[in-house]
């Protein structure tokens, strides 16, 4: 049974890199590598480690303006056809970025960009909604002939 927290050591990372050089072309490469590592991790954990951290082809640069535009467009397009954003969406976005720009970004980098943008947008929307609700609940000041600053002809005279 595997625990929830998964910690890869430098030795584990080096073993994955070494084995990927040998078995990287196999469709079941992560199953093979898992067996060679005595099932210390799940196949998915090894796959995710490779895709997000260890693959030497990963672009470590920050996302550029155009990459961000493509991410926004791709995620919005996927949201129209799906209820949620799952791992398949991030994989598709990464493929599209590679196709267009020739850079292989990690799924985590793409997902983190989107989530940070989405979260900050949600916070702004919530603040704006609260501000609008607050403005609606405040009584509006009304101007009348009894308001301060009006001309003398509208002044109320005491008896």
Image: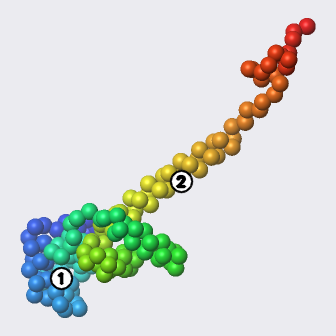
| Sequence-wise first label, 1 or 2 | 1
Display coloring? rainbow
- Image coords of residue 120 (percent x, y): 44, 54
Q: As rendered, which of 136 and 12 lies closer to the eye?
A: 136
Residue beneath the point at 14% across and 88% down: 23
Residue 133 versus residue 4 in the image, above or below: above
Tell me where residue 17 sits by quadrant.
bottom left
Tell me where residue 39 sits by quadrant.
bottom left
Residue 87 versus residue 26 in the image, above or below: above
The answer to whether 54 appears left or right of 72 in the picture is left
Q: Name the residue under label 1.
A: 34
Residue beneath the point at 34% across and 64% down: 65
The answer to whether 32 appears left or right of 112 in the picture is left
- Image coords of residue 142 (percent x, y): 77, 32
Residue 119 versus residue 75 in the image, above or below: above
Residue beneath the point at 32% across and 76% down: 97
Where disc 2 sits, the SS reads helix
Residue beneath the point at 48% across and 72% down: 76
Q: Can residue 21 be seen in this view?
A: yes
Q: Which mark is residue 106?
A: none
**Image quadrant in which the C terminus is located:** top right
Report the mark closest to the observer, 1 or 2: 2
Tell me where residue 94 sits by quadrant.
bottom left
- Image coords of residue 122 (percent x, y): 49, 56
Residue 137 versus residue 80 in the image, above or below: above
Q: Which residue lies furthest to the right in this view?
A: 159
Q: Which mark is residue 125?
A: 2
Q: How far apart are marks 1 and 2 (CA)?
A: 45 Å
Q: How crowded is mark 1: few (under 14 residues within 10 Å), some or many (20 or more)?
A: many
1 and 2 marks in contact (CB < 8 Å): no
Q: As rendered, which of 63 and 36 lies closer to the eye?
A: 63
């Amino acid at each position: 049974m595997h625990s929830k927290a998964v910690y890869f050591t430098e030795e584990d990372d080096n073993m994955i890199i070494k084995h990927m050089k040998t078995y990287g072309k196999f469709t079941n490469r992560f199953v093979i590598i898992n067996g060679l590592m005595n099932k210390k991790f799940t196949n998915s954990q090894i796959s995710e480690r490779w895709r997000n951290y260890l693959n030497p082809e990963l672009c470590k640069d920050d996302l550029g303006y155009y990459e961000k535009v493509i991410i926004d467009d791709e995620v919005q397009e996927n949201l129209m056809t799906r209820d949620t954003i799952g791992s398949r969406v991030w994989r598709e976005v990464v493929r599209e970025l590679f196709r267009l720009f020739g850079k292989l970004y990690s799924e985590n980098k793409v997902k983190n960009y989107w989530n940070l943008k989405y979260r900050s947008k949600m916070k702004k929307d919530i603040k704006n909604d609260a501000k609008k609700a607050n403005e609606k609940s405040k009584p509006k000041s009304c101007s009348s002939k009894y308001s301060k600053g009006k001309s003398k002809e509208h002044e109320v005279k005491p008896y």
